[in-house]
Image: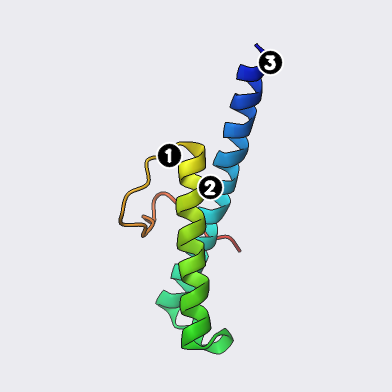
């Protein structure tokens, strides 16, 4: 039975990383919505960062076994800001 317990623990860890990636994406979306991203990033670097956040959320969702929709935009009722 240790294999099953280990798998459960790894799934919990993947879920935690997925939650963190979701909050990071929510932060970038809030930054974009407010227009503050222009103070900190160029258009190219911000696009790169937000695409990395989307990829990370998708990858951790797959590892955690979450059903990840093609539309990766988070809903406000699901996520809280990272900062």
Cα separation between marks 1 and 3: 23 Å
Compared to residue 43, the image places residue 80 above or below, namely above
**Camera-side residue of 59 and 69:** 59
Which badge, 1 or 3, comes first in the chain's sequence? 3
Compared to residue 75, the image places residue 65 above or below, namely above
Q: Which residue is mark 2?
A: 18
Q: Which residue is mark 3?
A: 2
Left or right relative to 28: residue 12: right
Which badge, 1 or 2, comes first in the chain's sequence? 2
Cα separation between marks 1 and 2: 9 Å
- Asked if one can make out residue 45 in the rendered structure from this viewpoint, the answer is yes
**Camera-side residue of 2 and 43:** 2
Left or right relative to 24: residue 69: left
- Asked if one can make out residue 80 in the rendered structure from this viewpoint, the answer is no
Secondary element under disc 2, as helix, strand or loop, is: helix
Location of the N terminus by quadrant is top right
Q: Which residue is mark 1?
A: 66
Residue drawn 51% across and 41% down? 63
Between tags 1 and 3, which lies in front?
Answer: 3
Which badge, 3 or 2, comes first in the chain's sequence? 3
Secondary element under disc 3, as helix, strand or loop, is: helix
Compared to residue 26, the image places residue 59 above or below, namely above
Q: Position of residue 37 (x, y in %)?
A: 51, 82
Q: Residue furthest top?
A: 1
Q: Position of residue 46 (x, y in %)?
A: 50, 79
**Camera-side residue of 68 and 74:** 68
- Numbered label tally: 3
Residue drawn 61% across and 64% down? 83
Residue drawn 45% across and 61% down? 54
Q: Are marks 1 and 2 in contact (CB under 8 Å)?
A: yes
Residue drawn 31% across and 54% down? 70
Q: Residue furthest right?
A: 2
């Amino acid at each position: 039975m240790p294999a099953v317990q280990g798998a459960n623990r790894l799934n919990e860890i993947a879920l935690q990383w997925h939650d963190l990636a979701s909050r990071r994406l929510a932060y970038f979306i809030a930054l974009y919505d407010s227009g503050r991203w222009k103070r900190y990033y160029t258009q190219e670097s911000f696009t790169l960062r937000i695409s990395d956040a989307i990829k990370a959320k998708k990858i951790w969702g797959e590892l955690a076994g979450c059903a990840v929709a093609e539309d990766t935009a988070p809903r406000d009722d699901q996520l809280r800001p990272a900062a």
